[in-house]
């Protein structure tokens, strides 16, 4: 039994079972979230609302990113692996 949420199987389902893609998506999104939390809003402001940032202040950026991947909030363009937030 796993106590880690979201489960790796859920995350891999969202990334065509590609662990490297999962790492790339989560890393890129966590970087954007970290930028927002530090007030560097140039690129990241369009990806997250202020309310969501305030609610997420007690969570680590990578945890937030993995949860967004599991919910299907993060998409990507397979041709460029460009990450999009819904």
Image: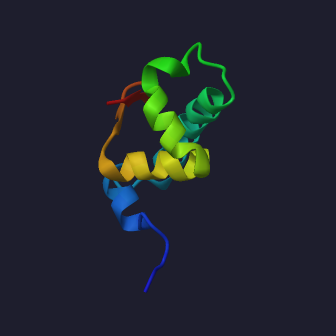
Identify the residue shown where x is 63% and y is 32%: 37
Quarter of the image for residue 46 reads: top left
> Which residue in the rendered view is the most extreme toward the top?
42
Identify the residue shown where x is 50% and y is 48%: 64
User: Does 54 sit left or right of 11 as displayed?
Assistant: right
User: Does 68 sit left or right of 23 as displayed?
Assistant: left
Residue 20 visible to an observer of this rendering: no
Query: Which x, y percent locates residue 52?
Result: 45, 36
Which of 56 and 15 lies nearest the eye of the viewer?
56
In the rendered view, tell whether residue 6 sits above or below residue 14. Answer: below
Quarter holding the N terminus is bottom left
Quarter of the image for residue 72 reads: top left
In the rendered view, tell whether residue 66 sits above or below residue 77. Answer: below
Residue 21 visible to an observer of this rendering: yes
Query: Which x, y percent locates residue 79?
Result: 37, 26
Identify the residue shown where x is 62% and y is 34%: 31
Query: Which x, y percent locates residue 24?
Result: 54, 41
Q: How many marks?
A: 0
User: Does 64 sit left or right of 61 as displayed?
Assistant: left
Query: Which x, y percent locates residue 44?
Result: 53, 22
In the rendered view, tell whether residue 3 sits above or below residue 60. Answer: below
Identify the residue shown where x is 39% and y is 28%: 84
In the rendered view, tell whether residue 5 sits above or below residue 21. Answer: below
Quarter holding the C terminus is top left
- Colour scheme shown: rainbow
> Which residue in the rendered view is the most extreme toward the right?
38
Which of 53 and 17 lies nearest the eye of the viewer?
53
């Amino acid at each position: 039994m796993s106590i880690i949420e979201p489960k790796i199987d859920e995350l891999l389902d969202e990334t065509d079972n590609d662990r490297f893609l999962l790492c790339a998506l989560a890393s890129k999104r966590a970087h954007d979230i970290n930028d927002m939390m530090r007030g560097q809003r140039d690129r990241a402001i369009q990806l997250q609302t202020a309310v969501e940032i305030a609610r997420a202040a007690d969570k680590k950026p990578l945890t937030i990113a993995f949860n967004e991947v599991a919910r299907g909030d993060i998409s990507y363009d397979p041709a460029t692996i460009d990450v999009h937030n819904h």
